[in-house]
Image (spheres, grey):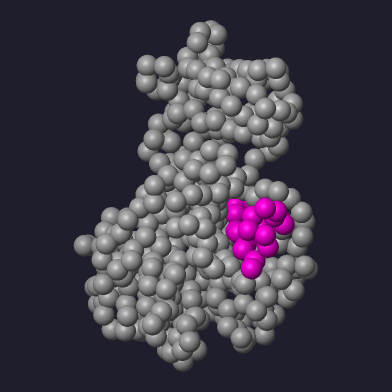
Amino acid sequence: MSTGLAGNGIIDILADDGTIWVATGNGLNKTTDGGQTWITYDHRNGLGRGGVSAIAIRNDIVWVATAYDTTVQGDDLPTGGGLSYSLNDGDTWTHIPQPGITPIQGLSYDIALTDSSIWLASFGQSLQFSADGGSSWTTRVPDRFPWDPLKYLNHRAFSVITTENDIWVGTAGGINRSSDGGRTWRNMNHDNAGLSGNFVVALGEQKYDGKSVIWGATWKAEGPGEYYGVSKTENNGLTWKTSLKGEFVHNFAFDGSTVYAATDNGLMKSNDGGETWGTFPQMVDKDTGERIDWRVFYSVRAHNGVLWAGGADGLAKTEDNGLSWTVFRAFDPTQKEETYAYPNPWSPLRWESNDLPPLRLQYHTTKDTRVTIKIYDFALDHVRTLVDGKFRGPGDFSEIWDGRNEGGEVVANGVYYYVVEKAEDGTAHGKIVILD
């Protein structure tokens, strides 16, 4: 049992009764006490190599896909690390190799479970299906053409969900629906159905008041007139409406009639079916002051009155609709007199362009104290006083530097040093490399 997350890159969040599952780039986490303690699963427990790329849960059965990069002829290519499943809520795991001809570019981005089948949305292997618990797999392309992901964009699958009567698959060629177990399909795209775009990275079903609404994160692909946004249907795909034009949406969550969208520009919410959207303000931990400082969110889940959201800068939850937050973040614990900066090297320009998480200076205190952090350049000239006499209790903390000096100018590339002065609790030193 650990107190922290496996990683700060939160890929997906799922809920099953009182259990919250969090998929990260460094493994899988599970909590049954609202995040006070976490269990971490990775390759040492039976998961595949790499970070978690997909997760699904049904009746205490958990399926997880992993992925990593492989270098082929000088190019880094995404590779499927295989599948792992647990029949006992994570107590034990069984691993199977990545289904398909080759795991290279065959990674699975999404998993859907029914009582009798498993469906995988796999980039280079299209849609894969198993009716025997994963012992054997069949490729079922969501159209009438022979499988060829190089020729047909609709054979590159990214998302899959199952509803009461249908299977829905999002690909690089639109959204596909089957009502007969995947034998025949109807394709809906920008041209024939009015989706915002044909690159469908996420699907979700919203159920309330007897309605079933299908939402898709529909990104711009190759066709003229396509745009990034959200597309939804309330009549099984007969007609579609779009919203959030220009937004990169990664995932959805639903709470009755309320819709949440995890986007590149923050966590968004709509109470009127997507006609209007609001963006949550910055998430700040109500007790520690820790903040989510990167506005890219990949995942969101609403469950039992609690809203969870995660991206590349950690995980946050609120029990009062965003009035207050608890922030969870992975970090290597520091000891007395120690500190480190991460990520390091770091680029302030890439952070400001939303391509990189913030730079954090991690440090440790052993008792109530006042903390001052000063940054110096290679010549030991003073650059910035980051905090001055800030109160901290015992524990691990971090401060954020935006890469600017006291005059508000972005500093030049190079090596910088910082000093953490803790009143009556010692001094720690660290190094930062700025590289644009």
How many marks are shown on the rendered structure?
A: 0
- Image quarter where the C terminus lies is top left
Q: Residue at x 60, y 58 (%)?
A: 23
Based on the picture, tell me whether residue 20 belongs to the magenta stretch: yes
Q: Nearer the viewer, residue 122 or 105?
A: 122
Q: Is residue 116 visible?
A: yes
User: Which of the 4 image quadrants contains residue 55?
Assistant: bottom right
Q: Residue at x 45, y 28 (%)?
A: 402
Q: How far across and down, in percent of the image, does residue 196 sit?
A: 28, 66
Residue 91 x/y as whole percent: 77, 67
- Residue 259 appears left or right of 98: left
Residue 48 drawn above or below residue 367: below
Judging depth in this view, the residue of 185 and 244 nearest the camera is 244
Q: Please identify the quadrant where the N terminus is shown.
A: bottom right
Q: From the viewer's perspective, is residue 41 above or below residue 95?
A: above
Q: Residue at x 53, y 19 (%)?
A: 388
Q: Which residue extends farthest left?
A: 225
Residue 250 showing in the rendered view: no
The picture quadrant where one finds residue 67 is bottom right
Q: Residue at the spot x=56%, y=24% of the render? A: 390
Q: Is residue 67 above or below residue 368?
A: below
